[in-house]
Amino acid sequence: MMGFGGFKLLFIWVLFLLCLSPSFSQFNPADKYSIDCGSPSNTSIGSRVFLSDNLASSYLSTPQNVLVDTSANSIPQSEYSQLYRTARIFSQPSTYTFRIIQSGRHWIRLYFFPFSASNYDLTSATFSVSTRNHALLSDFKANGASVKEYSVNITSGDLEITFTPSGTSFAFLNGLEVVSVPDPLIADDATSVKPPTNYRGLLNQALETVARVNMGGPIVTSRNDSLWRTWVPDRSFLKNPNLATNKSNIPAVRYPDGGATPDDAPRSVYGTAARMASETDPKSNFNVTWEFPVDRGFRYLVRLHFCDIVSDTANKLYFNVYIDDSSVLSDFDLSTKVEGNLATAYYADFVTQSIDDDQIRISIGPSGIRDVYPNAILNGVEIMKMNNSDGSLSGGDIPSSSSGSKKKNVGVIVGVVVGLAAVLLMGLVLFFVYKRRKQERINQSKMWTPLSTNGLSQTMGSKCSNGTTISAGSNFNYRCPFAAIQEATNNFDESWVIGIGGFGKVYKGVLSDGTKVAVKRGNPKSQQGLAEFQTEIEMLSQFRHRHLVSLIGYCDEKSEMILIYEYMENGTLKSHLYGSGFPSMSWKQRLEICIGAARGLHYLHTGYSKAVIHRDVKSANILLDENLMAKVADFGLSKTGPEIDQTHVSTAVKGSFGYLDPEYFRRQHLTEKSDVYSYGVVLFEVLCARPVIDPSLPREMVNLAEWAMKWQKKGQLEQIIDVTLKGKIRPDSLRKFGETAEKCLADVGVDRPSMGDVLWNLEYVLQLQEAVLQNDPDENSTNVIGELSPQIHDFNHADANTGTAQFEMSSGDDISGVSMSKVFSQLVKSEGR
Ligand SMILES: *[C@@H]1O[C@H](CO)[C@@H](O)[C@H](O)[C@H]1NC(C)=O
Ligand SMILES: *[C@@H]1O[C@H](CO)[C@@H](O)[C@H](O)[C@H]1NC(C)=O
Ligand SMILES: *[C@@H]1O[C@H](CO)[C@@H](O)[C@H](O)[C@H]1NC(C)=O
Ligand SMILES: *[C@@H]1O[C@H](CO)[C@@H](O)[C@H](O)[C@H]1NC(C)=O
Ligand SMILES: *[C@@H]1O[C@H](CO)[C@@H](O)[C@H](O)[C@H]1NC(C)=O
Ligand SMILES: *[C@@H]1O[C@H](CO)[C@@H](O)[C@H](O)[C@H]1NC(C)=O
């Protein structure tokens, strides 16, 4: 009955990958406009056709038509030489309008080469370029051949790009391209460099590519990039080229399941690296540094691409990475990010601010770990400027002379203000961390030291210790002699087995004082099992909550891996929903179970300084005691959540098929919201009483999450609910329940509610069912919290602002049984303390 560590259904994975594979094939963007301005004929570059200007004129609204071309000899050698031969001139404001079929991020690429034509010297042109929401270039003067690349999220039906000459000057353009960007390419979150916190909100940023560099290799042209990007060599950015050597092994490059893809960077980028020139000197101690010119006053998204093509075994290369003077990855072991594989693509995103510097420095250097050969690698870098608060990306395009000193002053003031704010924020964060640590210490001593005051533990203490307790730390008081467990389980009597899982068997057991327990005995041969065993002890010895299954003891004698839990009379939630012949539960019973499980998860996510992510939320891991009270079990896969300086944990995808967060699957970015997704699937399971994957059903019904969402979106969820519930759920209650589950299943984590919000909504679902609401509020919203309690709103707001400072809830607290509004108002108060 005890759910065991993650089920891994390999063949279904392969199926899943097959479903994903179309995205790896030829790039076929929904929106695709390529124009060779001023050209009488189409121009092919690789697989792209740049439309002749006369075919493209329907996109352009301009008061005049001036096309120019140049003699061939002055054109620079480049993959775009052909585009640079002709141009269009605008002496009045002119606008291109493109119909956008698929909303989302789009690249806008502007191709410029200023040549001298009969009546126009393009080098003298000064102009601005903007979209409806963003200034892309202001008073721009082209200096040599250049491609300006922007990526802008377009949500309305049209994209307008306007060229405006400065003063009496004119504007020109050699080529123009607008193409859809695959959605997963830019995620919403990254790690902020200074102060080290989460950065959220990249989805709303317009970006300008300021560098896209292939370390240790030659130029990679658009022909060799699935998304038509160009990666330039790194040589010219190296501060001291003598300190770096090239390494190349393109055929070795592999892409992990669910991580970096060829769309993130092609093989030819991941397959070459710059490494420390440390081959001959095991005492090498220096950084390899690249300097990239940028405009000061902007934030930048820095994406670092890594792929270990230098090591011969995993866990051998450890190094440090710095952005400017801040350490962003320290003692970094790439193999831990890619399941111990070599030559596997990985990237990390950072947001840094360039306050008073005209460059961003990226350095790699040896780690301080002893007995590790000094080496460090970097395979690729992308630097993207983020729009400022005016939505603008322009700045620094003219070599500013007159405005230089003024700008600098502004820079200094901004710097001071930002600096102060940063110091304050750091202070605040430190204060919360300190306070929480202190609280933890108090709670821990509350929880563990007085073992003798806790009836159950006392029994175990005396029973298990037998004078043999090894008390390394207070947590280890739970170690239990093997002999005592043998006795409790009638020497692992096969007829006492109550469950079997991937990890081993679960036995019923009775302690000498009559306490019933569940004894989970791991298969000692399983290495995987050992890690899960340790995680489970670690997690459960830190957490105690009415809605989490309690650990009573464990045994690791003679390489045994045995865990002893409180006995849960009624088994798993799953068995009560279908397939086991238990009587059908009422809607109210089901809601109470959902609420209990939500409380347990909410506590895991917020009850401790670091969020704990369960990673294997499913109905088989929700257990029921003799009163059908729900407790969450099986922490073998849990991970502590993001540290202060990270927004997510990158990790190999684990969990159970059918419950798996698609975002987690795609990006391996693990957040609490992955649990929220799985929990949403459980909600539908509870409502429909059928397995989450049922291959025996017709194709569109196999996956419960998809099937239920289809009916939810149609507003006809009642069509597919458990037949025994038909006519017994009040429509309001069902509607709210469906909405809540739907929100949990949002595609992207940020759109999903927190477990706290879910809990609150389910409380409300229960109230709607029981119709205890006095004056049924005009309830049509998606966010009950906002309506019923303005305080909660404030609280959410405060939480969002401080980012990492979650509300205080002492670890020993058990909030069940208290009305939720009381709990929340307490939380709000404690926030203000
Ligand atoms: C240019 O390309 C467009 C779109 O691919 C095509 O419809 C048109 O016939 C081509 N024109 C010429 C002159 O090849
Ligand atoms: C574009 O912006 C909308 C609204 O801000 C957001 O919901 C969406 O996720 C964004 N899309 C992308 C691909 O960034
Ligand atoms: C590294 O590779 C680049 C591009 O192929 C080349 O220009 C450079 O000379 C190489 N450097 C060394 C030290 O071999
Ligand atoms: C680019 O692709 C071509 C084939 O399309 C291949 O021959 C060439 O080696 C590739 N270049 C690099 C740098 O990967
Ligand atoms: C590398 O650069 C970082 C950041 O500038 C600096 O703190 C560190 O001391 C440097 N390491 C070496 C070995 O020079
Ligand atoms: C960038 O522009 C968007 C509006 O398009 C705005 O919401 C966002 O706050 C801007 N970014 C910054 C850092 O101000």
Image (tube, helix red, strand yellow):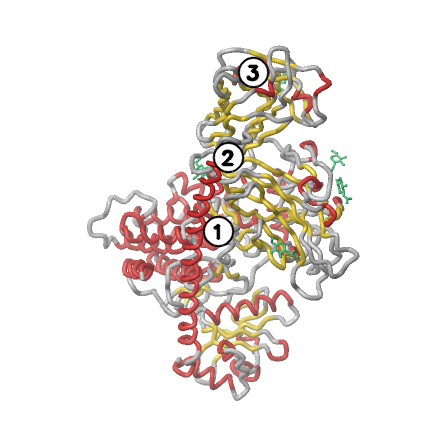
Seen from the viewer's position, the closer of residues 777 and 801 is: 801
Q: Which residue is mark 3?
A: 89
Q: CA distance from mark 1 to mark 2?
A: 33 Å
Give me the disc on residue 404: 2
Name the residue: 54% across, 35% down. Answer: 208
Q: Single out the residue that lies furthest toward the bottom.
A: 467
Kindly identify the amino acid type of the residue bearing the numbered disc 3: Ile
Circle 1 crowding by C-alpha within 10 Å: few under 14, some 14–19, many from 20: many
Sooner in the amino-acid sequence: mark 3 or mark 2: 3
In this view, 116 is above or below 684: above
Residue 576 visible in rendering: no
Circle 3 crowding by C-alpha within 10 Å: few under 14, some 14–19, many from 20: many
Question: Quick one: quadrant of the C terminus?
Answer: bottom left
Kindly identify the amino acid type of the residue bearing the numbered disc 1: Asn
Residue 594 spot, x, y in % from top left: 39, 58
Seen from the viewer's position, the closer of residues 502 and 106 is: 106
Residue 526 spot, x, y in % from top left: 64, 67
